[in-house]
Amino acid sequence: MTEQELISGLRNGEEPAFRELVSLFQDRVFNTALGLLRHPTEAEDIAQEVFIQVYRSVRQFKGDSLLSTWIYRITVTKSLEHLRSQKRKKRFSFLSSLFGEDNRPIHEPGDFDHPGVLHEKKEDAAILFRLIAELPENQQIAFVLNKVEALSYREIADVLTISESAVDSLLQRAKQNLRKKIAALPP
Amino acid sequence: MDMKTERIERIMGGLDGLQKAGAPDFFYTRLMGRMQQEPERKQVWILKPAFITTALGVLLLLNIFSFMEIRSAGSKQESRSRHEQPAGIESFARAYNMNTQSLYE
């Protein structure tokens, strides 16, 4: 099935087209969300929301970018929205004691263990993921798309609708900040 | 390379050779289940944050405007009544034949 056939099938609400789309993109969407959220259950939840959004708004997809770029964009946006809402909840939880809604403790991501990390690098990767979360949003996205999802500068530039040189500068700044943060860690 | 730089570079390389994570098993089944459970929510325009903020802003402006109007009207009336009071009392006394002298007559 070509991309055009896939899009037209989705626009007609055909189930096989949707199944094909999910099977083509589920790993990419999940891996990107996982890199940004550092929590498998939340990443799956966001990945589901991404496909629901794609299904419901595919008629608005003008086709001026690749389908994959559009889906990555939705994934990044949804993941960031989720992170922001978590931050908001955390701020409010300060006022409403240690418990969140329904008296459940608000999820505090601890050290994240990505399933694809090499065994001997697990400890370093956990530290790195923790520090990536402290970076400004744009640097975080660029770094995760490059290092976790292995996208090229061109692909990242398309997702973020910026130039390739802007991506390069974002990644350089991200690396600089990470180095500073690592240097400031206790030995 | 000193120990500190070595440590920085080692941690920076923590994601080297990373394998991409795959979506969990039965992802599609769970997705379909969720789609059937959650019917498409039509966004009610009146509940959109932009509308709510604008409406609150308009209400606030109306409140400030009415408050200022009431205050200025009040101060105008007060100054007018301050000027008109003697004449008002005199005319009242005249109308009811209640001038001060009449009490001692």
Image (cartoon, coloured by chain):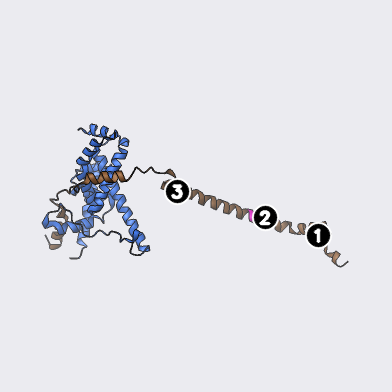
Q: Which amino acid, by three-letter code, is at mark 1? A: Ala
Residue at 34% x, 56% y: name it: A88
Residue at 23% x, 34% y: name it: A6
Label pair 1/2, CB-CB below 8 angstroms? no
Separation of disc 1 and disc 2 at Cα? 22 Å
Q: Which of pointers 2 and 3 indicates the residue nearer the eye?
A: 3
Label 2 resides on the chain identified as B
- On residue B77, the disc is 2
Secondary structure of the residue carrying numbered label 3: helix
Viewer-side residue, A56 vs A154: A56
Label 3 resides on the chain identified as B
Question: Where's residue A123, x and y in %?
Answer: 15, 59
Secondary structure of the residue carrying numbered label 2: helix
- Letter of the chain shown brown in the rendering: B
Which residue position is annotated with label 3?
B52
Question: Where's residue B31, x and y in %?
Answer: 25, 45
Q: Is residue B73 visible?
A: yes
> What is the count of numbered marks?
3
Q: Earlier in the sequence, mark 1 or mark 3?
A: 3
Label 1 resides on the chain identified as B
* Residue B89 falls left or right of residue A156: right
Give the magenta part as a residue range: B73-80
* Residue A161 falls left or right of residue B80: left
**Chain A appears in which tint?**
blue
Quarter of the image that includes the N terminus of chain A: top left
Which residue position is annotated with label 1?
B93
Residue at 25% x, 58% y: name it: A109
Question: Are discs 1 and 2 located on one and the same chain?
Answer: yes
Secondary structure of the residue carrying numbered label 1: helix
Q: Which of pointers 1 and 2 indicates the residue nearer the eye?
A: 1
